[in-house]
Image (cartoon, grey):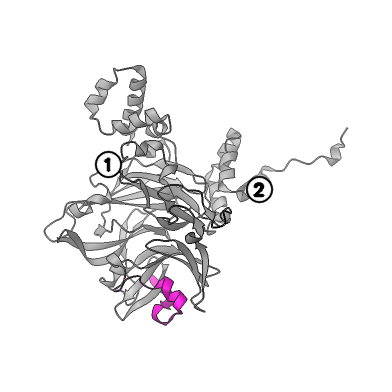
Amino acid sequence: MDDPKRRCPVLPDEIMADEILARLPAKSVVACRSLSRAWAAALSSDDFIDLYHSLHGGRLKILRLHEEAKSYTDRHGAAPPDRMPLAISAGSFPRMVKMFWEDCQTIPVLLTTQCRGLVIVELSPMGLLYVCNPSTGQKRELPQGRTTGCGRNREWMHEYASLGLGYDVRSRRHKVVRIYHSGCDGEGRPASAGCEVYVLNGGSTDQSWRPVCAKPPGWVHPYKITVFAQGHVYWLAHRKHHLYEGYTRSTEMFIACFSVSEETFATVPPPPGVDSETLRKQCLTVLAGRLSLFSWGCPDHGQRYDVWLLREYGTNTGWDLHCRIDVATTSPEVYRFLGPRYDGGHADGYPPIVPLAIVDDGCRILLTRNELPNKIRSYAPLTGDIENILDFRSLQTLDPTPLEFAVYEESISTLGKQTCKDIILSSSPSTQALSLLLHLIPEHTLLRLMCVCRSWCTTIALYLHGRSLR
């Protein structure tokens, strides 16, 4: 018989959770939740999620968005390198989203920067919105907003909505912030504007959009990504806009912010030397956990990048100039990557380059192109050196160019309890198709269709119940 003294003692629960389980990859932690109810409760608790974030937060990974998932190999047929970014493609979403759009190409569009590992993706042209956890592969469709305002494709009609994703440190919950506009007055200001909040991983009482008393200070930009940093969600916005020859002309640009905890709006003054007109050519993002304004094409210098970091938000709001990149004085290799591809700058005022992250204690910046982002390069502002991190042109495939790159971090945050509608969408393809069709049928017709058979009665009843919760 075995000597009892030589047997391995049972590890305390604190050691199992804090020293072992909290250091596993997010997918492994999610898998461990299914082992028992006790483990599911322990590994889904707010304390454990915060512990996991403290260990893995800030260790950014690269995410790429594709039209379709493809298997990549290099030019010699070998497997891609280990640093190959994680992919989110249209094929990774339920099949039902394509059934009524066979003539249109389904494209995933990133709407927000990552917020504690979660992002919001829109499937175009359908306008379906999903919250995604890239590290676990979990996805959840967001319910439609309760108020007026639709997708970004109607921005020219002054009627659209914009989403942001933030985290409330008080309630320890993710919140989706939706700003909507409807109509324009005679001076170019919003005729009707409002805001509503959806608690992503809240309880059973938080399964619908909740109106917020605070009103947005102006039009938020519908085609630029929203940013979460330092407890606030940020948008590039403008006071007025007008239709001119079929295009919307924005005036009086500014930075709008929404406090996720207080649920109030405010504005952030731009950095020194950045006025309303030059703010049109800027890019908001998150670098080193702080709001960053990536400036391009200042009035006094047309080919210069300024990387500004928001010092803090509050009474001492200010900006720190992290680095300045003068494209005209860089080496030819750096100029070919950082410089504009067309004379006169980038179309629509967007910077030719988009920053992804600051690494190596602020010594290097990961950069990619705004258009055709087939490369990720690391640039050292102090030395002017540039290093190739990833080049999709070296990978053999039919269409190697991703739609865009982004960053995320390992996260075990839950996406909340599935609604009845979500359960339908994860069922068989025929039921998925029927569920999507229900969106287009009036309610009085649905009540009559419930008499067809028991299967239809159950499906429609679940769908109507899920719609009433929203």
Residue drawn where x is 29% and y is 66% of the image: 347
Residue nearer the viewer, 109 or 217: 109
Residue 446 highlighted magenta (yes or no): no
Which residue is disc 2 drawn over? 20
Q: Which image quarter is the N terminus in?
A: top right
Q: What is the three-letter code of the residue carrying label 1?
A: Arg
Residue 293 percent across, percent down from the top left: 38, 68
Q: Measure the alpha-carbon separation of dots 2 and 1.
A: 43 Å
Residue nearer the viewer, 217 or 182: 182
Mark 1 neighbour class, 10 Å CA radius: few under 14, some 14 to 19, many 20 or more:
few
Is residue 212 depicted above or below 445 in this figure?
A: below
Question: Which region of the structure is painted magenta?
Answer: 317-343
Residue 363 percent across, percent down from the top left: 53, 73
Is residue 198 depicted above or below 244 in this figure?
A: above
Q: Is residue 415 visible?
A: no
**In this rendering, would 457 be left or right of 16?**
left
Location of residue 300 (image quadrant): bottom left
Residue 266 percent across, percent down from the top left: 31, 61
**In this rendering, would 465 be left or right of 181?**
right
Q: What is the three-letter code of the residue carrying label 2?
A: Ile
Residue 222 percent across, percent down from the top left: 28, 56
Q: Which image quarter is the C terminus in?
A: top left
The numbered mark, 2 or 1, whose residue comes first in the sequence reads 2
Q: Which secondary structure lies at badge 1?
A: loop
Q: How many marks?
A: 2
Which residue is disc 1 drawn over? 146
Using the image, tell me which numbered label, if any, was put on residue 420: none
Mark 2 neighbour class, 10 Å CA radius: few under 14, some 14 to 19, many 20 or more:
few
